[in-house]
Amino acid sequence: MKKSHYKYGHLMFNQSLTNIYRSLLMILLTISAHQQLIAEPLPQNFTASYSFSRNGMNVGEVKRSLRRSNDGMYVFESVSEATGFISLFVGDKIIERSMWTYVNNRPQPLHYAYNRSGGKKKRHVKLAFDWQQGIVTNTINNDPWQMQIPPDAQDKLLYQLTLMLDLKEGKEKLHYSIADGGKLKDYEFIILGEEIVDTPMGKLHSTKIQRVDDKRNTTIWCAKTLDYLPVRIEQDEKDDAELTMVIRNVTGLPVASASMTSPPGD
């Protein structure tokens, strides 16, 4: 074999090997991206602020945030407190926090905490989920007890993220088992249709849903361009008062594409 032919063959072999490496690298990157997409179907981080009103009068604000902690778990938090003139008479502050992880692409709660402080009614609740035993330990004002839970049980904050995910996946059956107050409660929603919701962020194309068999008559509008984040919530109280939450701003979600004047196809 001539030396030139040997060099040429060696060069072709190296080039083929390089192409193989590149192909393998692309496959690995594709698999990795696909696995990440499956493992994290919801946004990793976002914050949203809402105005809270009672019978049309602004009485407070609600801030919700989702973040990933250093240990790889996720933290979903809601902070509610009175604002403006009302805050002179009502000092209550409510903090809810759900720590959770993904199991089979579904949010699964690990710990839930509810703390109400600053006013006359103080309340501290903790839920610890033991999925190996299929139980949750409820601790209310330092008084603990346990109850059995199904594999798909949620806490009363985390289910709202699961609801977003179900709407994003096009599911029509929206049913959740909520561990709350030492009881297992059923939350079921029906889809009423599509509506444009007018908010301080603009007009948002939303899916309107309503809770079934709810004595308080809860209706929620979830914006499609914000990963079905709730942008308006209305609830009728027993004393005929109407409570309303409306989104004011959000970060971490595609806000720029959120404003729409009408649903697609109209």
Image (spheres, rainbow, N blue to C red):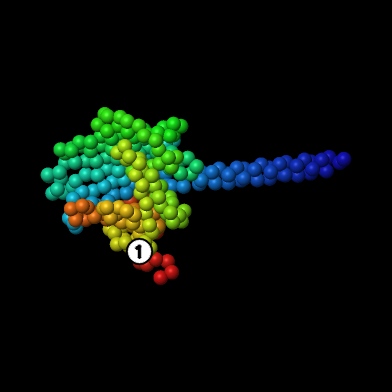
Q: Residue shown at 31%/45% (left/top)? A: 64
Could you say whether the residue bearing mark 1 is in a helix, strand or loop? Answer: strand
> Residue 41, image x and y in percent?
46, 47
Q: Residue shown at 55%/43% (left/top)? A: 32
Circle 1 crowding by C-alpha within 10 Å: few under 14, some 14–19, many from 20 = some
> Residue 123, image x and y in percent?
23, 36
| Residue closest to the eye, 46 or 234 | 234
| Residue closest to the eye, 121 or 46 | 121
Q: Tell me if I can see residue 150 in this picture.
A: yes
* Above or below for 26 versus 197: above
Q: Residue shown at 37%/54% (left/top)? A: 189
Residue where numbered disc 1 is placed: 195
Q: Quadrant of the C terminus?
A: bottom left
- Furthest-bottom residue in this view: 266
The quarter holding residue 153 reads top left
> Residue 70, image x and y in percent?
41, 34
Q: Residue shown at 34%/44% (left/top)? A: 185
Count of marks overlaid on the render: 1
The quarter holding residue 6 reads top right
- Furthest-right residue in this view: 1
What residue type is disc 1 on? Glu
Q: Tell me if I can see residue 248 in this picture.
A: no
Q: Quadrant of the N terminus?
A: top right
